[in-house]
Amino acid sequence: MSEDRIEFEFVQTNVYRRRPCTLCGGATDKVDILTEARWPCGNILTEALGGVLRVCESCLKAGNIDERLELRAQKLEAQAVGMRYLIGQLKMPSFEDWLAMSERANIAWCAQDETGSRDVYKKVMEDDAFYHVWRQNAKDRLESGEEPRCDSNPEDLDLPF
Ligand SMILES: [Zn+2]
């Protein structure tokens, strides 16, 4: 075993959120003491900035650190094989398609809010003619300066017109 082993220490934090664990790929709880080590390549392993290796409480409690490292390495290798298999295999909508669907969902929320009907939401999402009527209503309201009849802020609607 190397004399230059990477030494972990306790790091106090007052930002209570889950943080990625280098060993298991899981996360810490929302704790106030983290177990971390600085290592220049740490961010490659946790996808976090700052070159940090971190061990969650579960890994620390289990204690079999090297076994966990090996298991995690095997999982990452399997994930890499799976990722490479997907190259050239994915067919997906464009970003513009996503924007249009997002706008439609905003209109549907307003329609549901105005009518109090979940069925209206579904119909806006599924029926193109019905959607265009509601979209035109929203456009007319915004252009006339009228408050939209839903809780959404006009800026939040993110409408292209
Ligand atoms: Zn862990």
Image: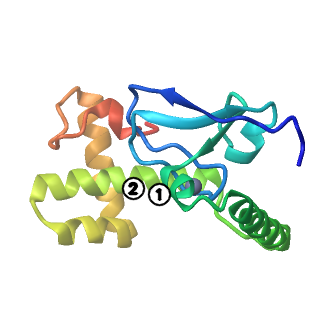
Q: Is residue 80 above or below residue 42?
A: below
- Locate residue 95, reporting x and y percent: 62, 51
Dot 2: within a 10 Å radius of its alpha carbon, few (fewer than 14), some, or many (20 or more) residues? Answer: many
In the rendered image, which quarter contains the C terminus? Answer: top left
Asked if the residues shown at circle 1 and circle 2 are in contact, with their CB atoms under 8 angstroms apart, the answer is yes
- What secondary structure is marked by label 2? helix
| In the displayed structure image, the side of residue 116 where residue 50 appears, left or right | right
Q: Quadrant of residue 35?
A: top right
The residue closer to the viewer here, 100 or 63, is 63
Q: Residue placed at 61% from the left, 35% from the top? A: 36
The residue closer to the viewer here, 136 or 67, is 67
The residue closer to the viewer here, 155 or 45, is 45
- Residue 104 bears which disc, if any? 2
- Locate residue 94, reporting x and y percent: 65, 56
- Locate residue 90, reporting x and y percent: 75, 70
Q: Residue placed at 74% from the left, 47% from the top? A: 45
Cα gap from disc 1 to disc 2, whole angstroms: 5 Å
Residue type pointed to by label 2: Arg
| In the displayed structure image, the side of residue 116 where residue 20 appears, left or right | right
- What secondary structure is marked by label 1? helix
Residue type pointed to by label 1: Met
Which residue does the numbered mark 1 point to in the structure image? 101
Query: Which residue ends up furthest to the right in the rendered image?
Result: 2
Q: Quadrant of residue 53?
A: top right
Q: Quadrant of residue 129?
A: bottom left
